[in-house]
Image (tube, coloured by chain):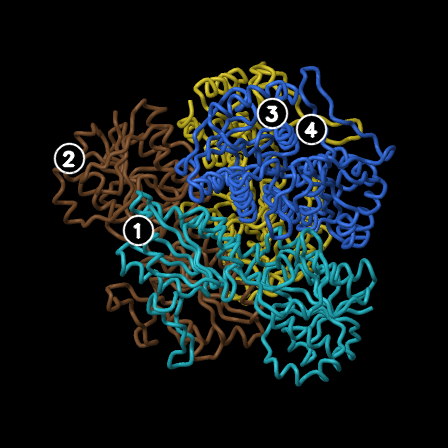
Chain colours: A cyan, B blue, C brown, D yellow
Amino acid sequence: MRIGVLTGGGDCPGLNAVIRSVVRSSDNLFGSSVVGFRDGWRGLLEDRAMELDVTKADGILTRGGTILGSARVNPEVFRDGLETVRETLRARGVDVLIPIGGEGTLTAASWLADNGVPVVGVPKTIDNDIDGTDLTFGFDTAVSIATDAIDRLHTTAESHQRVLLCEVMGRHAGWIALHAGLASGAHLTLVPEQPFDVDEVCAMVSARFARGDQHFIAVVAEGATPKEGSMEFRVGGIDEFGHRRFTGVAQQLGEEIERRIGKEVRTTVLGHVQRGGTPTAFDRVLATRFGLHAAIAAHEGRTGQMVALRGTDITLIPLADATKHLKTVTPERLAEVVSFFG
Amino acid sequence: MRIGVLTGGGDCPGLNAVIRSVVRSSDNLFGSSVVGFRDGWRGLLEDRAMELDVTKADGILTRGGTILGSARVNPEVFRDGLETVRETLRARGVDVLIPIGGEGTLTAASWLADNGVPVVGVPKTIDNDIDGTDLTFGFDTAVSIATDAIDRLHTTAESHQRVLLCEVMGRHAGWIALHAGLASGAHLTLVPEQPFDVDEVCAMVSARFARGDQHFIAVVAEGATPKEGSMEFRVGGIDEFGHRRFTGVAQQLGEEIERRIGKEVRTTVLGHVQRGGTPTAFDRVLATRFGLHAAIAAHEGRTGQMVALRGTDITLIPLADATKHLKTVTPERLAEVVSFFG
Amino acid sequence: MRIGVLTGGGDCPGLNAVIRSVVRSSDNLFGSSVVGFRDGWRGLLEDRAMELDVTKADGILTRGGTILGSARVNPEVFRDGLETVRETLRARGVDVLIPIGGEGTLTAASWLADNGVPVVGVPKTIDNDIDGTDLTFGFDTAVSIATDAIDRLHTTAESHQRVLLCEVMGRHAGWIALHAGLASGAHLTLVPEQPFDVDEVCAMVSARFARGDQHFIAVVAEGATPKEGSMEFRVGGIDEFGHRRFTGVAQQLGEEIERRIGKEVRTTVLGHVQRGGTPTAFDRVLATRFGLHAAIAAHEGRTGQMVALRGTDITLIPLADATKHLKTVTPERLAEVVSFFG
Amino acid sequence: MRIGVLTGGGDCPGLNAVIRSVVRSSDNLFGSSVVGFRDGWRGLLEDRAMELDVTKADGILTRGGTILGSARVNPEVFRDGLETVRETLRARGVDVLIPIGGEGTLTAASWLADNGVPVVGVPKTIDNDIDGTDLTFGFDTAVSIATDAIDRLHTTAESHQRVLLCEVMGRHAGWIALHAGLASGAHLTLVPEQPFDVDEVCAMVSARFARGDQHFIAVVAEGATPKEGSMEFRVGGIDEFGHRRFTGVAQQLGEEIERRIGKEVRTTVLGHVQRGGTPTAFDRVLATRFGLHAAIAAHEGRTGQMVALRGTDITLIPLADATKHLKTVTPERLAEVVSFFG
């Protein structure tokens, strides 16, 4: 049998670990060969094939990024290209395709499956917002990096009696903020799922310093927003040159806190460091298991599915089920973080 | 209400995170106070109480070890001391006791519950061998440390074309070896659950070098043993001074490989570094959630139970169920590690 | 004898290691006691004394920040307060004062020495721009953190074929950028000492991609500036609320590169994570040695001096010499970084 | 011009950074090509050449080990092979050879220089025992790894009130022990330069626990030895199969302490993890500068020299001077470590 593999969407620690796992296990368990397609779906549309053997997969387990590259493709362009995709797969002799990606990539994979292309999806998102799987690889690495950073900010905040806001990734789901907040003992965690009230935030900050505490640390998901009318809020815009303007929520909230209660605030935006570099041991294990079980499913003909973590097991769920809803932070999990600080 | 807490058994990253979580959430959610008992069960037998408030719990989230100390107590001595334990709890005004510990501590906790003492257990073991919970805190930290070490050994092995054996913790269960082996791309993983055949190990090593590969890395759980008759094996003994003699399985296997096939072998025994120091973000989250949910269960009167991770939820299971069997590596999980290398 | 100690200026990994070293060695070598003054010079002006003994110094070696706190004091206010300072030192029985700080703190220390107060200075700056010492503690930690971050950005940049700009600390001296650039293999390093030409930067970027390379990484010191007329450059300003506006050089340069050559650029501003948290082993050794030798000099009456690293030795230099010039990156050192890429 | 390069002796983080630096700067500054010889001097004796260009040097900056491999060669065999070496260099068109290695490699390099072969040496030793240079690359990485490990052991020792001995590398010089001991706040540091008295060690341990302290940490260089008659000491031997027997000094000292004063002791031998893996930022900078200045010296015809760090400068010193003496820990530096504890 012959397997195809591609990586779509943003960078994520563990992508190479999945690729290596698919290649090594296809070879070792089934004697099958693997062909990669470069730059996501574009690789199929433009036949950017790259033979992947055990030697090419050697040493990539610990490497961040993806040796296959990634690129975004317009969904319409992709759908119009169905015949091209079929043709590329035929020409390259691919029996089953394993696309590794986030919501966009998996939606496309699900649509391909509906159109008769045998696929087994592997979920990827550092935001951990894909439904149907307990966790996705990359998330633990992102949380670890954010936690390390907040650990460092703690001591600076204490020494200078400051408010410190740390903006982490998470546009639609606050999982990274939630876990990094719990792991670092942040005094406040703001997530997209629950708009914040600036007055309440200021009251919490004031109360803490009034009690004699020396610092205040908040973790702010990039997608967090103030409650309607709670503060003036500049949503990201485009400047005269067509470039994105700086509109970080943490920066704006920080300025507002300084203005309202006069405490010195510092803001740190972690940005891309959260999604690059060597994956944690946890993510390497998860990515490796995902790759292995995707390869096994492909060889057993169980296609139209996505690998998923359930408890300690890797299972398969229908691709269609995984892409219906975004998995957001539940009220129960949010309640956990407010259990520690008023 | 008033909560008692103690830590039993060996050191484990995350113990302080549990203590902090119990203290903070008891105070913040219920206005309850917490008293700690030093040095495990001995603290109850000898009334080594230590008041724990929010200030004492400050800053310990990231710290390894346990501020309460730990010590082993003979189970018989403990059982004979039931009345003393009851008396200490009464004198200190403790309504519910939260013991944090491994198999021994939880068995004692279960027995206390059977004797009418309200307890809520928190499972702790870096070996991950407690049944009824998907994972225990400390395990992810141990796996991370082992994986970092093996990453470092890889390059040395490659540069010198050597066989490298890395012995990791795990007397009865091979979970650390299994995960560290997967995470580091080890070529072989030996666990207590499946005795190894030295001839097969040597054959794998020889085959790999014969194919032109430059090095061979094996992860060996300290509890791994050779198959009967497979090699002479010195089980640990006691020297003339009553001290434990050096009997590492990795060292013995390494000497055997050198002897049989003449390849240069180096052995590293990671030892106690695996169980000390700052917990990973993952373990801090898990420990914090365990502490929170133990405090909630205690306040809701749901005693005789142990907190457990099931999927993404923290649940309660009867203490008696958790201590019946050791959770060992299953054949399915073992099959995963042999999927990548012959 | 009795020693006074204070920490001035910004946060810096290793401050606590110096404090611990002064306390431990004063006690152990000379049987002397140590009193700390909180919040920099303010501690002397307002008598914020805090007795420091071996127990208080316990466990702070690895901790970032400063247990003494820090604050900035207006130099005029400070000079007007000379008699108050003298009075506080007399009242607290201080024989020699050891101020730990950067240019401002050491200038004040030098002035105190000129006015008859016995002081031994300890240089502190993560920017490494204090003259007369090969290195200062905190610098190695800052470079390590920046290097780790750039390592992570590398893989993201490669996967997406992007230009990545990483802004690091260094307002007047580019040492952090220089070392982090060398350590991470950045393709370009911009420092305050040499204004950059935007056309040249764009040409380098274009040339690299034209050769088939997949990414471009630049390290930009926050104090780097474009050559006159090279690009429109918004120097930091104050907004209508009296708050600092976002004016990062990396952000502005990134937008300019996108505009001129159309390559996708991402910018990361590392910010305060560079100056917090556990110091590296190197910084702990340097800080510990600085503290020890400052304590010895204080006890030997060699005051009006500053400890300094020269080669592998800790020496003393006149405080006046250390504060005359800022130590900036030399042309020879700058030449090193352009040896590797065009 | 054409440069040859090889790596000799044991593994050391930073070797690849030197290779990359020689290749990149030779290409970029001088348009010169570089050929590598595999497996140390053996590469010259058996003509194991490997062309090194900028692409091959790409991405190796952060990688531990050496892409050229390393092996030990009998010095006599090497000297007998002088004509073969000359022939290989001639055949490969090498104008100047850059050997990177420790005492053995540099002694051979010095002898080659005496015999008319143009060489520029680069010193390498994680032990930091090469004379004439302030520091060597690899040392900072080794100290960092040892310090991280001891940080972890601290909390375990505290929790269990134990004595913890950590054996680090350093057969003839105690630099790693000295710096790791300072960086980790160890209570005792034992180095090869000064034999220890077991009675004094036991007295220190007892005194510390008698004062109420909870733990005792000692760093022990592998080359440390007890004073004559101080304790029975088994020097390493060879077992019946010709293999090295376990003879660690820390293990033996630990058993002796348990025997004499009855405190529980745990021993950790760090071993090979100290010399593998990604170099620290410090070592990457030093290795990169060594490689650059070696390439420049080679092109300027300044041969028979070795690059060396003096203060903040990279200088050249005669190879003959560097290999006369081993650089051992001075009494002054040893005095530093005993300034903090008894």
Q: Secondary structure at mark 2?
A: helix
- Say which residue label 3 marks: B72
The residues bearing labels 3 and 4 have C-alpha atoms spaced at a distance of 30 Å
Which callout, 3 or 1, points to the residue nearer the camera? 1
Q: Quadrant of residue D104?
A: top right
The residues bearing labels 2 and 3 have C-alpha atoms spaced at a distance of 56 Å
Whether labels 2 and 3 share one chain: no
- Under mark 4, the amino acid is Phe
Q: Which residue is nearer to you in this view: D49 or A241? A: A241
Chain for numbered disc 1: A
- Say which residue label 4 marks: D246
Q: Where is B190 relative to B70, above or below?
A: below
Q: Residues within 10 Å of mark 3 (few under 14, many from 20)?
A: some
- Say which residue label 1 marks: A206
Q: Residues within 10 Å of mark 2 (few under 14, many from 20)?
A: some
Which callout, 2 or 1, points to the residue nearer the camera? 1
Chain for numbered disc 3: B
- Under mark 3, the amino acid is Arg
Which callout, 3 or 4, points to the residue nearer the camera? 3
Which residue corresponds to the image point at 80% horizontal and 61% vertical from the top-left? A27
Q: Position of residue D300 (x, y in %)?
A: 49, 58
Which callout, 2 or 3, points to the residue nearer the camera? 3
Q: Position of residue D22 (x, y in %)?
A: 55, 58
Which callout, 4 or 1, points to the residue nearer the camera? 1
Q: Are marks 4 and 2 in contact (CB under 8 Å)?
A: no
- Under mark 1, the amino acid is Ser
Mark carried by residue D273: none
Which residue corresponds to the image point at 19% horizontal and 32% vertical from the top-left? C89
